[in-house]
Image: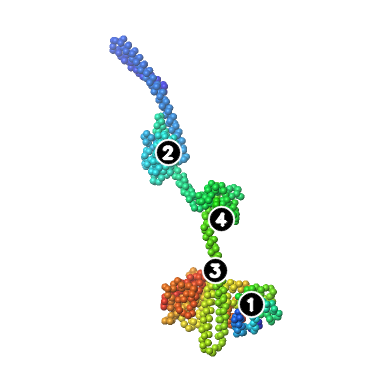
Amino acid sequence: MLELIMCIDDDPITLMLFKKVVQKAAFAKEIIYAYNGQEAITFIDNIQTEDTKPQLLFLDLNMPVMGGWEFLDLFNNSNYYHLNNTKVIILTSTIDPEDIKKSKTYPNVIEFLSKPISVEMLGYLKTII
Amino acid sequence: MKNKTNQITLTYIIAALFIAIISYKLAKHYSSYLNAYNFGFIKDILFIITTGLLFRYVLHKNYKRNTETYKKLKQTNEKLKESNEKYDIVAKATSDTIWDWKIPEDKLTWNKGIKGIYGYSQDQITNNSKWWFDNIHPEDSIKMSIKLYSFLEQKTEKWQDQYRFKCADNTYKYVLDRGFILKDENGKAVRMIGAIQDITKQKEEENRLKLLETVFTEARDSIIITQATSDEFQIPKIVFANPAFSKMSGYDHFEIIGKSPIFFMGKNSNTQEIEKLTQAIKNREECFTEIILYKKDHSEYWVSLSFIPIYNLEQDLSHWISIQRDITEEKKLEKEKEILIAELTRNNKDLKQFSYITSHNLRAPLSNLTGLLNLMDDVTIENSELKEIINGFTISTHLLNETVNDLAKAITIKDSPAMQNEELQIKDIFKNILSQLNLSIESTKPKLNIDYGNVSKINTNKVYIESILLNLFTNSLKFRSKNRDLIIDITISETNHIITIHFRDNGIGINLERHKNKIFGLYQRFHDYPDSKGLGLFLVKSQIETMDGTISINSEVEKGTEFMLTFKSL
């Protein structure tokens, strides 16, 4: 079981669902929520200690204020080298093949998943991280 | 000759004197009237001498005249001989056919040329002028004879004519006939000698050139010929332009001559294309371009232009020929088409974007619903009414989810660029599909006959082939007949890297007469089944076409349906 993961999504129901499925699958002990990319960046900027560093990020693409792509561009920036090992999973409802293609250009994005998140998906993720 | 006259006169006098003397001697011997005989003898002698002298005078006169005539004849003969010799030489040199017409007797003879060139044997020729005239082409003979007779009557000084002369094989040759007259002392034409030259080749060439010239004059495309210039920096000048060029450019012929082709270009003529043309001229290479030219009234027109170097027999560049076709209308259409395509592309892109957004916006809440319902699985519900409601809610949500996912898939197929192929075991594909359909197969228990034929591996797109077969299986299971056990027959074969799959069931079938044109259309449902979404065959067709394949259908109501699929496996 992971210690700390982060879910970045603007939809409260998705977040609620995410929490429940994570609990059910016993995937992680703690989840940090961010409603958009900007909030996630603010949180990451304020990380002080190793134990407040999320081990895995679940990222939606379509969000207000700062979307998933913009977040990824910032996150890949050298400022966040301390988070270089943190893997990102895109969790979205988009079906645009361009998005899947684009996600492959970010080295820390390890998976592109379609909503809704399920216990099976988390079971699969456990095998690859 | 003079001696001869004297000789004849002398012989006459001697012979006459001899007879006179003999007569006198005989008379003296037999008669006694000597005096009378003496007198007669003297008279005879005088008569003889007088007639002798008279005779000589006449002979002498005649002799003079004869000498003159003889001289004249000799001269004429010599002239004739010389002419004949000359003509023979000329005839040999020019391969002319010589004829010789003795007019008073109407005797016309031919030299060897009549055989060699026109193919006549001696027995085919009649040596008179009729034969000659008979062999002249009917269309030419009247004109020719008029000219000839006026020459014979010396109304004209020279005679030469062109006409068609019939050969032994009944074809006609174009000939040039030239002749001269020999006159007698009275100036009357007695003989005519002529030389016929075969000019068929020249005439044919002339006709060919005339025909070729019509290409130049009648063409709708502009044709200009320019001189070749030895100066490589100089643009050659136009020496000839056809009427079409005048019409196209609005300039008169005299205004065009001497101008350079560059003269007709202007501010909107593509400078790169002009550079290309001048470079080609410099390099003496042919050049093709499309460029804007300017008319005399300064209006623009587009031409497709060629500029081709022409070399003479010595392989020296002699001229350039340029052919120009007015493509203004085509350019206009092309531009319109480009604008239209750009507009359509933009619209298409917008629509695609719109469909992605719509599908995203549909999928987002739907995925939440699905996720929430999945969570409900673990919740025990006591209230039976609520349980029923939630059950219905779950079914509807799953159906909606499937529909949205299928639609999303259809959009993705239409938009997918190159396909990724991989080598697949055909048996694995079916194993995979059947395991996905495990539940429905368990419940319906169809009889499955799969004949893999000569196929073991295929090289294709895994997702597509699985999706296609899954759809066909699902359809067969879904639309099975209640009156009989379901049988599905599948035969697979390969020829020349083309895979053919026959997929046959004994289900309820489709009324093809009614639905023929919309079988593979979007949102076409042929049966009133609750879980039929009208997307399956549309997806199948889209996917097989993306695989460069084809699909066709045979079906009969209450008998079954057969699909024939073909696709490449390379």
State the SS at label 4. Answer: strand
Q: Quadrant of residue B97?
A: top left
In which chain is the residue bearing label 1?
A
Residue B22 in the image, given as x and y percentages of width and height: 32, 15
Q: Could you tell me how far apart the alpha carbons at marks 4 and 1 are, in whole angstroms?
A: 56 Å
Read off the residue under disc 4. Answer: B291
| Mark closer to the chain start, 2 or 4 | 2
Q: Residue at x 54, y 66 (%)?
A: B344
Tag of residue B348: 3
State the SS at label 1. Answer: loop
In which chain is the residue bearing label 3?
B
Q: Residue at x 43, y 81 (%)?
A: B482
Considering the image in quadrants, where does the N terminus of chain B appear? top left
Do marks 1 and 3 share a subunit?
A: no
In which chain is the residue bearing label 2?
B
**Three-letter code for the amino acid on which mark 4 is drawn:** Ile
Read off the residue under disc 2. Answer: B98
Q: Is residue B130 above or below residue B475?
A: above
**Three-letter code for the amino acid on which mark 2 is drawn:** Ile
